[in-house]
Amino acid sequence: MTRSELAAFFSRSPALSETEALAVLDNPNCTAAICQGIALTSRLTSYYSIRAKLVSHKATPHTFALKFVHYLYWVDLLRFSTDVRVPGPVRRSIENQLLAKLQELALGERITAAKACSREVVKSLLFDANPLVFASLLINPRLKEEDILFLISSGRAHPHQLTAIGFDRKWSWRYAIRRALVLSALTPRSVAASQLRFLSRRDLEAIAGRGETSIYIRRCIGRLLEAGLSSGPGDR
């Protein structure tokens, strides 16, 4: 239907069924007035499917969309929080609602959320102690190098997280991350030592001169420098 036909159909059909209301909302010509009319019909909004559709619909007045956010299941909160078609203010409310529910989610749900959540939720899940959650987070396309560096330098990272980062195919080759792993006192020494050969002579000498650097790492650096194996960008 065209916009005028859809408006006429909606005005002539006060007793829309759930299926009909969803079809109206799916029509690209659905207007804010129609969305508001559906939102004000308590019989229709008693259906979860319609509340969810109104939240995600770009034409729904924000007052109603924000109201129905509180009724969404976590899986829809996760889906809508990264859907750019959902208006910004509504998406932020969805994100806040999801953040508030994180601690209530079961392990399997947190693993699922970690794989596809938004940037703000990524930052929260960084400190989830479960290794399976962190492994899922490492493949999230919204995870950034700055998030990894923040975790490493926070002093709150778990050794299993630092180990996972040190052997991750996507993240372990990045120079800033290699250096941060060596600098962190929480990094297991075998993981820290495995990064040394990739660092520049300048950084190796600086790390060896730090009071916080362990004797083990100092000795590893000393052997590398004596053997002349370091050939990073800082050597030139």
Image: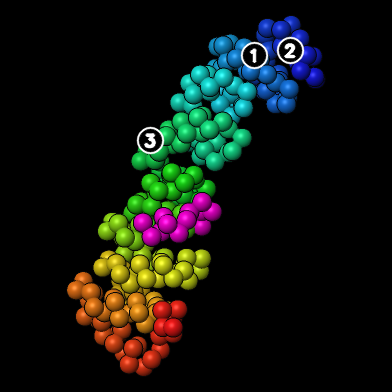
* The label number, if any, that marks residue 7 in the structure image: 2
Figure check: 192 above or below 103? below
How dense is the environment of label 1, judged by Cα within 10 Å: few (below 14), some, or many (20 and up)? few
What secondary structure is found at the residue carrying circle 2?
helix
Rendered image quadrant of residue 218: bottom left
Residue 108 visible in this rendered orientation of the protein: no
Please tell me which residue is depicted at 26% across the width and 79% down the height of the picture.
208
Rendered image quadrant of residue 83: top right
What is the distance, in whole Å, between disc 3 and disc 1 at their CAs?
32 Å
What secondary structure is found at the residue carrying circle 3?
helix
Q: Amino acid at mark 1?
A: Ala
Residue 168 x, y percent position in the rendering: 47, 67
Q: Amino acid at mark 3?
A: Ala
What secondary structure is found at the residue carrying circle 1?
helix
The span picked out in magenta is 139-150
How dense is the environment of label 3, judged by Cα within 10 Å: few (below 14), some, or many (20 and up)? few
Residue 46 x, y percent position in the rendering: 55, 17
* Closer to the eye: label 3 or 2: 2
Q: Earlier in the sequence, mark 3 or mark 1?
A: 1
Figure check: 231 above or below 65? below
Please tell me which residue is depicted at 34% across the width and 76% down the height of the picture.
203
* The label number, if any, that marks residue 100 in the structure image: 3
The answer to whether the residues at label 3 and label 1 have Cβ atoms under 8 Å apart is: no
Task: Give the quarter of the figure containing the N terminus.
Answer: top right
Residue position for label 1: 33
The answer to whether the residues at label 1 and label 2 have Cβ atoms under 8 Å apart is: yes
Q: Nearer the viewer, residue 90 or 203?
A: 203
Residue 42 x, y percent position in the rendering: 55, 11
Name of the residue lying farthest toward the bottom: 227
Task: Give the quarter of the figure containing the C terminus.
Answer: bottom left
What is the distance, in whole Å, between disc 1 and disc 2 at their CAs?
9 Å
